[in-house]
Image (cartoon, grey):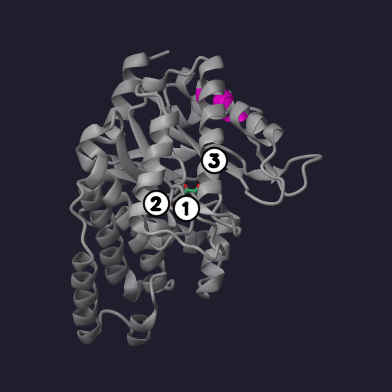
Amino acid sequence: MNTQLLIDTANKLVANDKGLLAMDESNPTCNKRFAKLEIPQTEEARRAYRELIITTPGLGESISGVILYDETIRQKKADGTPFLKVLTEAGIIPGIKVDTGAKDLAAHPGEKITEGLDGLRDRLAEYFQMGARFAKWRAVITIGDGIPSRSCLEANAHALARYAALCQEAGLVPIVEPEVLMDGNHALEQCRQVTEEVLRTVFSQLNSQRVMLEGMILKPNMVLPGLTCPTQASVDEVANTTVKSLWRTVPAAVPGIAFLSGGQSAELASARLNTMNLRFKSKLPWALAFSFARAIQKPALEIWQGKEANVKAAQQALLHRAQCNRTARRGEYTAAMEKLSASQIERDAQRGKIPAPLLATPHR
Ligand code: 13P
């Protein structure tokens, strides 16, 4: 195992207040998001959209690494330049999603198990040889009536640990993503209890599979009340509870924690990350970073709408979210950053750069 390479990559991914951009939606998920905006669900549209993302000028100033999908890692710009070359030249580390999706867990109604271990060693070797330096695997935990079960947590944690050990053997930093979903009407406290149990189980399995903690990144959910819970939490409550849970469960040897956004609005995800860093950064053993998909991409996708004429405005929105999140890592993000961006977008619309109807689209 190339210990030094793993440690260096993991540290680079969370250095300089940067974070990760997840653009690893599977084809069905990407198509679903395109369909909502009436964008054609074709390989070419997916390629054009991913080209828009990775060619955003200045992206590498806020983004340390991007997570790609098997289709995307093999794609090229319209002019024939491989995506991997574009990323490397922008100083962005390429990563790859390697799980094959969450499927129903047998005998456990309402619960999922993530698949993808079969043949993983060979796939990892190919991705490393192509230039990827980290990988991602997402486990999905649902809170509901009588769930999650202990057996679901153990099965998912075991798979995450097997995946992480194989990644490290191949020279790839594992991004270990156990996601407790926001769906449901559970309270903040229930999410806290489940998240802590999940993380304890995951680290116990990582230890038994001999995963080197210094060469991995944890990608957890923030601790949040369910989407339909009548009592929602303040930004301060979310920040305090999330940091407390991580403090209790994540070993200090882990270099970085990069949150998923999980369906939060882009602005709330930035505000919550900001408050955690503002209050606790100097006291924590690990970096608190981001690895958002929707909370970085959604505004840009809504502006793009599959139209070449909207590419520049969409890139501007994408860059803005990346910059907001880098600022949140420093604890310096403010709501005023959003107002500035809105007035910039309005000016661009007046100059005809953005179609007027899009101005009414809330980015939530
Ligand atoms: P979201 O930030 O949209 O939750 O996506 C992160 C991710 O990588 C999901 O696996």
Residue bearing mark 3: 193
* Camera-nearest residue between 174 and 279: 279
Nearer-the-camera pick, 204 or 90: 204
**How busy is the neighbourhood of tag 2: few (under 14 within 10 Å), some, or many (20 plus)?**
many
Question: Start and end of the magenta stretch?
Answer: 159-164
Residue 224, numbered circle: 1
Q: Is residue 279 above or below residue 269?
A: above
Residue type pointed to by label 3: Gln
Q: Secondary structure at mark 1?
A: loop
- Identify the image quadrant of the N terminus: top left
Q: Which residue is mark 2?
A: 238
Q: Main structural element of the magenta stretch: helix, strand or loop?
A: helix
The reply to whether the residue tagged 3 has its Cβ within 8 angstroms of ligand 1 is no
Mark 1 → mark 3, Cα distance in angstroms:
11 Å
Along the horizontal axis of the image, is 108 left or right of 132?
Answer: right
Residue name at image x 35 percent, y 46 percent: 240
